Image: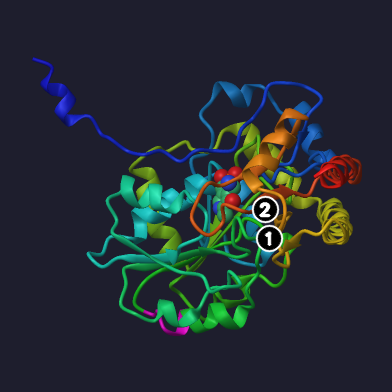
Amino acid sequence: MGNWRDNLRSVEPYTPGEQPKEKDIIKLNTNENPYPPAPGVMKAMQEMDTDLLRRYPDPTAGMLVDAIARRYGVGPDQVFVGVGSDDVIAMAFMSFFNSEKPIFFPDITYSFYPVWADLFRVPYETKALDENFAIRAEDYYGENGGVIFPNPNAPTSRYEDLSLIEDILQHNQDCVVIVDEAYIDFAGESALSLIDRYENLLVVQTFSKSRSMAGMRIGYAIGSPELIKAMSDVKYSFNSYTMNQTSLCMGKAAIEDEDYFQDCIRRIRATRDRSKEEFAKLGFSFIEPGANFIFVTHPRLEARKLFQQLRENHIYVRYFDKPRISEYLRVTIGTDEEMDALFAFLHRIINES
Ligand code: PMP
């Protein structure tokens, strides 16, 4: 009796950052954008023909795929869209990581990678970042079933130059290399400039961060038509209608407002520059941030305790109780006002300690 329990799938799930219900909090824990989406996004929602809700959406997500393709100067057959980049990466794991050999990713990185690897039964090996939390290209030279890493990396915020990515690509022509660019718009040059030369390179980006649409769940991948076709075949074997009509309309409006997008990035970078100065004045050290968050540590303040003190004072940041990074806090760049409130609080704590 009860033998069905023997066949339950047991997995250790990914734990997303908290989404507290209280109002009046300063929320710097999940790398959301502090500014609203482009004005055209609300307009697109208001103007949406409700008859479209009665029907199934376009399974090819054509209007959104075309808008993304136009923005990045690639063909529509080079774009795959999904329900956030989490969905896109999950599809990529299923589509590309089917070797007996282990896939490689850094020891400190987006903690969803080992979860997908376990879920899809993909063997993996982690490669230790160096003492400055940099990726060492040589670690990725060995035989493997695929490579994935974020650039900038999470939670370190460290951006690696394209020369490092190209080095990894040159040594990995027999597997798919995925560069997870969730935060690239806040950093430097994208690996998209390499897709024409490396048909095994998949670049994944998202509307959740630089386009202020985490709630809408839109992510995309750009790569060679062959990679995109393989992902689409997997998607159509799983769920034909991943993208709902509202995300198609609102996503298109978001990607077409380039001026608003550039302005938003500029503001967040300016606040990031100011925040670096303030953290330094308070005695924190950090890795040069490339993303919309900063990974900080203090020689006298215990990270776990500080995380709790901040939380009790309605300021949410992210703490990871993991080897090598348990003395760090990851702080999302909010508005100037939010950051000022954080710094005023930290100032008090430091003066009292
Ligand atoms: N990659 C990285 C490195 C991330 O930090 C995140 C955000 N948690 C994602 C992918 C997924 O973002 P989304 O699904 O919202 O596009």
Q: Which residue is mark 2?
A: 67
* Distance between the alpha carbons at the discs numbered 2 and 1: 5 Å
Name the image quarter holding residue 34: top right
Q: Secondary structure at mark 1?
A: helix
Q: Which residues are magenta?
A: 169-173
Are there few (<14), some (14-19), or many (20+) residues within 10 Å of tag 1?
some
User: Magenta region, mostly helix, strand or loop?
Assistant: loop
Residue at x-position 35% and y-position 52%:
117
| 170 drawn magenta | yes
Observer-nearest of 150 and 323: 323
Could you tell me if residue 219 is visible in this image?
no
Task: Examine the rendered structure and indicate whether residue 214 appears above or below residue 126.
Answer: above
Residue at x-position 51% and y-position 70%:
129
Query: How is this picture coloured?
Result: rainbow
Q: Secondary structure at mark 2?
A: helix
Name the image quarter holding residue 32: top right
Are there few (<14), some (14-19), or many (20+) residues within 10 Å of tag 2?
some
Which amino acid, mark 1?
A: Arg
Query: Where's residue 16, x and y in %?
Result: 54, 38
Q: Which residue is mark 1?
A: 70
For residue 332, the mark is none
